Image (cartoon, rainbow, N blue to C red):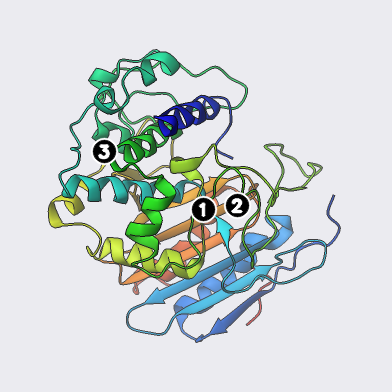
Amino acid sequence: MSMFHARAGLLAVALTVAGATMTTPPSAAARDRGHAGNRDHAGIRRALGRVVAGGGCPGVVAEFRDTRSAPWFGTAGVADMTTGRERRPGEHFRIGSLTKAFTGTVVLQLVAEGRLTLDDTVAKWLPGVVEEHLGADGTGITVRQLLNHTSGLPDAVLGQEPAPPEEPGTRFVYSKVNYSLAGMIVELVTGATLAEEVEHRLARPLHLTGTYLPGAEETTVRAPHARHYSKLGESGPGAEIHDVTEMNVSWAGAAGGMVSTTSDLHRFLNALLGGRLLPPAQQEEMFTTVSTEGSGWVPDTGYGLGVYSQRLPCGVTLWGGGGFIQGSMSYAMGDRQGTRVLVGNLNGDWNDFQETFTTLFETPFRPATSSPDASSPDGASG
């Protein structure tokens, strides 16, 4: 019961905290390691250069894997704006809302084991919690609605009171609170922490040695890592850049608190898309999406149970997710079978999230009949 009260306290914190002086400018030159030379890799190199050009972010990494060829890893910019140290493979970084894919997978594994159902109500597992903190009726909200953001519960916004709850099942409303509640349910069902369940069910079996959910006492990112930089929501060329590598993000928890690496995210997403983590019934549930149209969230997307689909301008639809938290922006998406997957991370949070996604993913996933724009200025090398 003490775990329950502790997590309820974190929910209260989540309702008041948002989802997330340097001297050396980042280099715009892109570097690659491993196998290079085909059209996909050249395009990604150019994209990396464009992402950091003009101070768009301190540094960026990308790892592309295709089952038909060897993995490729590339970087641009820097890991440390003071020393100029380059970004490199194996770095840990905060993954933000990509955490939701891990949380959703754990919930669905518990469903497969018969320990709860997607139609269970929040009130069954967390009686009185949403009533006390959000003024909502937990008897009318299901676990499925938490995971696909149709619960009607509002998101947490810094410095503002939560918006009134809406009628459950009416429309998609992206809310970190949904996954805070889902994480609490996992802990009540299992009697273990979500961090322990992620380690036991996902990290250990998949050999995700750099993936973990830190607690309140772990306020930095495990080595090796890039420094994490933030403008703390300010915009404009004069906005100050802050080093937020040391930061307590336990409030984000099941919704966005995890740390991982590019290679770990590849292994996880490949296994998830390939159907190796869930039985067929739960796999179908996870990838059954609701429309996000009109919600003001990421355009051209459909949201499942912790993952989402997104249609690129070239018409190709990818699956996986993205994550934004102070000091870090991450993406892990691939085709529906997981045969081609790109994972990227920026160690800064002021780049346009959607524009960066399109820049990084359009070239490697564009149909072969479409020609990449070779004339784009990028300042990249390699």
Can you tell which quarter of the image residue 1 is in?
top left
Q: Which residue is mark 3?
A: 290
Give coordinates of residue 227: x percent, y percent. 70, 58
Q: Mark 3 vs mark 1: which is more N-terminal?
A: 1
Q: In the image, what residue occupies the spot 45% across and 41% down?
A: 255
Which label was assigned to residue 321?
Answer: none
Q: In this image, 291 relative to 263: left or right?
A: left
Give coordinates of residue 120: x percent, y percent. 20, 30
The answer to the question of whether label 2 and label 1 lie on touching residues, with beta carbons closer than 8 A, is yes
Which label was assigned to residue 328?
Answer: 2
Q: Mark 2 vs mark 1: which is more N-terminal?
A: 1
Q: Secondary structure at mark 3?
A: strand
Q: Is residue 379 above or below residue 20?
A: below
Q: Answer whether residue 185 is visible to the viewer in this image.
A: yes
Q: Secondary structure at mark 1?
A: loop
Q: Which residue is mark 1?
A: 95
Give coordinates of residue 290: x percent, y percent. 26, 38
Dot in front, 2 or 3: 2
The answer to the question of whether label 3 and label 1 lie on touching residues, with beta carbons closer than 8 A, is no
Q: Secondary structure at mark 2?
A: strand
Residue closer to the observer: 263 or 78: 263
Distance between mark 2 and mark 3 Cα atoms: 27 Å
Q: Is residue 26 above or below residue 154?
A: below
